[in-house]
Image: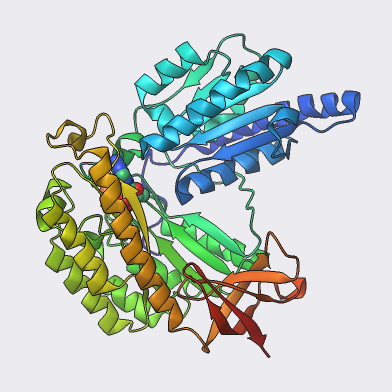
Amino acid sequence: MSKGTRDRKNIYVSPEEMARQQRFIDEIKELNYRKEVKTGKKKLYCLNTFGCQMNEHDSEKLAGMLAEMGYAETDNVNESDLVIYNTCCVRENAELKVYGHLGMLKPLKNQKPDLVIAVCGCMMQQPEVVEHIKKTYSHVDLIFGTHNLYKFPELLYSAMDSQTTVVDVWDCDGQIAENVAIERKDGVKAWVTVMYGCNNFCTYCIVPYVRGRERSRSMDDILEEVRMLGRQGFKEITLLGQNVNSYGKDIGDGTSFAELIREVNKIPGIERIRFTTSHPKDLSDDLIYAMRDCEKVCEHLHLPFQAGSTRILKLMNRKYTKEDYINLVAKIKENIPDIALTTDIIVGFPGETEEDFSDTLDILEKIRFDNAYTFLYSKRTGTPAAKMEDQVPEEVKKERFQRLLETQNRISKEINDTFLGKVVEVLVEGVSKTNDKIFTGRTRGNKVVNFEADASLIGKLVNVRINTVKTWSLEGSIVR
Ligand code: 5AD
Ligand code: SF4
């Protein structure tokens, strides 16, 4: 038998429990059907997702279960029968937005008492958040967390029938639930989770507290899912995890992310493979060689460096130095010369001096990322950094942030300029939101390209000659 099989005890939700959830799905479907016959209208849900791709993918699972229950989707909150917020707590901003939305729903709930309001996801894993919602937003019907997403059918069934807020949040790590229905929004690109949780405890980050320890899916389950996606006509797969490079370590039989990638590369129908996120300390030579050798793995790597100063990196508990990072990128570029690099950067971590910040700018200049996701440090209760002295004043953070953006925007534009006149391979994803003759897709390096095409090309690889360059995207025409 191959490695990475599904024989670890207690790590999976049992088939009996999944069957029990299916019965709740069927019950709700029956109720919804009866209501539909009476009113002539399908029941509608409005699902709002905050945060990262993991959350987006969790929302695809919620949507999958809701479709099985006979709900249809709407983006109009006023006409919905069920409103769900799948929340993020990585930065304070995302949390404030959710509270704003919940406050605005109160009049609607008064008008429509049958409306069910549910909140789930990372924010709910913090007990003080749950208390605050119960106290301040008592019109919320259902609160659940990240570890029991698969239990949504049962919880929704209880909430539909309850006068008080149903709360079910687990503080232990959730088991892996296989075979949850997934409603993928996109027909060309698909996310596939390879692992849940994170063991790194970067001192600024709340994720390990709300997503739990690392738990890898079995390689057999992942490969089976990708094979099915290949048969269904999906062309691009993004393997997801908080730290995909440590995939398999908890399985303990030598299963590794590099090996997984080599196996995914063999699957028919899939033309492109991406993955996110990678931690520099865990990116092995083996993975670099797998990226180099596997023709379907795109020449793009998202490799957050967070801060340039070795002193700050130590305070962040990142376990690499500025030099380690630069050397790692040199090794990657040696093996994959045309790799496009993107990164995450935090500005204003506690104690960050102007000199520390200049190391961040220095890394930008030295590495020349194609794109960077930049964040103002946000204090997260319960993390070690929240208790550190020397919190950087907001105005200093903002001023540094501005300089960071200007530097990165200039570099992104300079890199994009090198594409002028070149022909690039683009996977056609869909029509642009503003003009139905303009289609959009991405290069292997993950650059957005807009061009004239027709719907028959969606899901196909085309060659596009670039004739206009912007900071965030490229424009061109198809070369036949
Ligand atoms: N403040 C600001 N940014 C943060 N990130 C994680 N935690 C925080 C925080 N407390 C950023 C990191 C991470 C990305 C997903 O979010 O850069 O890579
Ligand atoms: Fe957070 Fe660090 Fe884990 Fe990423 S690696 S999720 S930043 S603790």
Image coordinates of residue 319 in percent, x first then y, are 15, 55
- Quarter holding residue 368: bottom left
Using the rendered image of the protein, determine whether residue 299 is visible from the camera's viewpoint.
Answer: no
**Residue sitting at 51 percent across and 88 percent down?**
422
Residue 273, relative to residue 66: is it above or below?
below
Task: Report the number of numbered marks.
Answer: 0
Seen in the picture, residue 130 relative to 459 is either above or below; the reply is above
Q: Residue furthest left?
A: 311
State the image quarter where residue 385 is shown. top left
Provide residue 428's location: percent of width, then percent of height. 64, 72
Specify whether 13 is left or right of 449: left
Give the side of residue 244 with respect to residue 158, left or right.
left
Q: Which residue is drawn at 74% across and 33% down?
A: 44
User: The N terminus is located in which quarter?
Assistant: bottom left
Q: Which part of the image, by quadrant, shows the C terminus?
A: bottom right
Q: Is residue 357 left or right of residue 262?
A: left
Residue nearer the viewer, 68 or 145: 145
Could you tell me which residue is drawn at 36 percent across and 26 percent down? 126
Q: Is residue 33 above or below residue 248?
A: above
Furthest-top residue in this view: 163
Query: 223 left or right of 207?
Result: right
Q: Which colour scheme is used?
A: rainbow
**Residue 137, image x and y in percent?**
52, 16
For the residue pair 318 and 100, the one nearer the viewer reads as: 100
* Residue 197, visible in the rendered structure: yes
The quadrant in which residue 362 appears is bottom left
Q: Nearer the viewer, residue 352 or 90?
A: 352
At which x and y percent is residue 223?
49, 62
